Image (spheres, rainbow, N blue to C red):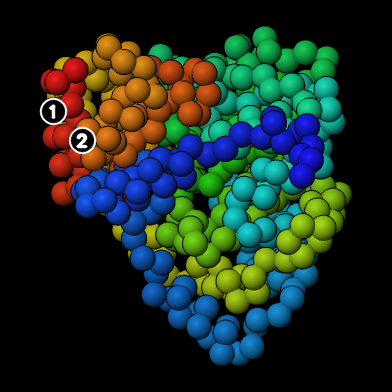
């Protein structure tokens, strides 16, 4: 079978590869603590599960519109209008099976071969993968620890050339847990307008923030016309396996993204969409309780890692990841990932899996119990002592 040359440019998401290795070790009887996968360990709230069951019993098991069921698009538009402070209608919304299709469809709809696309590095690896697959030029925007894992706007401005057409932002960020501040976002909005850029604003962790507020590019004047905002249900309501996400964008863009849905998935699962309406409009106590628990876990893992000689760890402001600095240890990030998994049964991810600027770091998800987090830190500490 002949494969397209572009397939050689398609990357992957290492978290699932490490998860597979960890499962193989577990199948051989090893105990593994999973800090590699970005998945809440909570159950989906009961009211959302009940809504899905009702939808099934009512026969919502058939095709729906490519852009999403009107009732969900209306609920999303109302939610985004409230949370981002901008008037959004259902025609600005496209619902997709998970958040990743919005990344894929946004770049597919807006980027030509040879265009330059600026993306965060370290960042979610699918950004760079899709940019390269399209034949565009992936231009990394370094996300630096000394900048609290925010965005250096001057550095961003210096990367923009006449060929730059598209910018990817992510706040709160995977893998660093960093936030783009209001001042940084305001200056980014000015750059976007000045250079006529299109932006993918990945805000999938917008509800998982500690002691601060989420700042959205959509909130700034004129940005709705230039922005595709990605959000969804996987992280906030522990709905990873339900596969439900959405994008908010200009109406003309929504038309083409819905056309891409027609050509690929046809539509998003109908009874899942009705459960998503309940997620947005129903009680929020369980979602809020998850964030409170994530904050407790964050504090435990940061304190534990900072007690290990050779490791330093900033306290993340959002999401559920820490990104400890391990440059003082005598092995590369990838070697440490393999060492901690194979020798100590702790599944972590190399920071280099998220881009070249992630070398010297590890990503650990604290979407696990405090008991397991404490045990994982003890195992890592022992591993460091044996290096």
Regarding mark 2 in the picture, which secondary structure is present there? helix
Nearer-the-camera pick, 120 or 384: 384
Residue 344, which numbered label?
2
Q: Which quarter of the picture shows residue 312?
A: top left
Q: Give the residue drawn at x 49%, y 62%.
A: 241
State how many labels appear. Answer: 2
Residue 133, which numbered label?
none
Tell me the crowding category of disc 1: few under 14, some 14 to 19, or many 20 or more residues within 10 angstroms, Cα based: some
Position above or below: 57 against 277:
below
Tell me the crowding category of disc 2: few under 14, some 14 to 19, or many 20 or more residues within 10 angstroms, Cα based: many
**Distance between the Cα atoms at labels 2 and 1?**
8 Å
Residue 210: where, in percent of width, then height?
Answer: 35, 41
Residue 216: where, in percent of width, then height?
Answer: 58, 39
Residue 9: where, in percent of width, then height?
Answer: 69, 30
**In the image, which is nearer the foreground, mark 2 or mark 1?**
2
Nearer-the-camera pick, 149 or 1: 1
Image quadrant holding the N terminus, namely top right
Residue 151: where, in percent of width, then height?
Answer: 53, 21
Nearer-the-camera pick, 67 or 129: 129
Q: Which quarter of the picture shows residue 363?
A: top left
Q: Is residue 377 left or right of residue 330?
A: left
Q: Give the residue drawn at x 34%, y 35%.
A: 348
Contact between marks 2 and 1 (CB within 8 A): the answer is yes
Position above or below: 29 against 360:
below
Q: Give the residue drawn at x 65%, y 81%.
A: 61
Mark 1 highlights which residue? 382
Position above or below: 277 against 139:
below
Nearer-the-camera pick, 166 or 280: 166
Q: Is residue 212 visible?
A: no
Q: Is residue 349 left or right of residue 292?
A: right
Q: Earlier in the sequence, mark 2 or mark 1?
A: 2
């Amino acid at each position: 079978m002949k494969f397209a040359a572009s397939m050689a440019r398609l990357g992957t998401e290492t978290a699932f590869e490490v998860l597979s290795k960890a499962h193989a070790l577990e199948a051989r009887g090893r105990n593994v603590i999973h800090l590699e996968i970005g998945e809440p360990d909570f159950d989906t709230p009961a009211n959302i599960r009940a809504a899905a069951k009702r939808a099934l019993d009512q026969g919502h098991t058939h095709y729906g519109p490519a852009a999403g069921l009107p009732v969900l698009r209306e609920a999303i538009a109302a939610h985004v209008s409230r949370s981002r402070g901008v008037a959004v209608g259902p025609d600005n919304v496209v619902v997709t099976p998970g958040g990743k299709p919005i990344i894929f469809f946004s770049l597919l709809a807006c980027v030509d071969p040879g265009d330059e696309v600026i993306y965060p590095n370290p960042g979610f690896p699918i950004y760079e993968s899709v940019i390269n697959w399209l034949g565009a030029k992936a231009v990394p925007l370094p996300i630096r620890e000394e900048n609290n894992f925010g965005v250096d706007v001057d550095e961003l401005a210096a990367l923009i050339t006449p060929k730059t057409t598209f910018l990817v932002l992510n706040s709160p960020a995977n893998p660093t847990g960093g936030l783009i501040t209001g001042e940084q976002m305001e200056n980014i909005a000015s750059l976007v307008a000045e250079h006529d850029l299109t932006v993918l604003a990945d805000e999938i962790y917008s509800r998982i923030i500690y002691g601060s507020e989420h700042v959205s590019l959509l909130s700034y004047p004129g940005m709705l016309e230039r922005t595709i905002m990605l959000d969804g249900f996987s992280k906030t309501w522990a709905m990873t396996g339900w596969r439900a996400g959405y994008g908010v964008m200009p109406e003309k863009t929504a038309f083409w993204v819905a056309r891409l849905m027609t050509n690929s998935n046809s539509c998003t699962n109908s009874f899942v969409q009705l459960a998503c309406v309940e997620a947005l409009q129903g009680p929020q106590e369980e979602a809020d309780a998850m964030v409170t628990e994530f904050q407790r876990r964050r504090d435990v893992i940061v304190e534990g890692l900072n007690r290990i000689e050779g490791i330093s760890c900033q306290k993340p402001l959002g999401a559920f990841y820490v990104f400890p600095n391990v440059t003082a240890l005598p092995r590369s990030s990838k070697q440490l990932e393999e060492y901690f998994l194979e020798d100590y049964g702790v599944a972590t991810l190399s920071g280099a899996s998220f881009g070249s600027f992630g070398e010297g770091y590890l990503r650990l998800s604290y979407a696990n119990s405090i008991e397991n987090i404490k045990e994982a830190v003890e195992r890592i500490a022992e591993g460091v002592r044996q290096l």
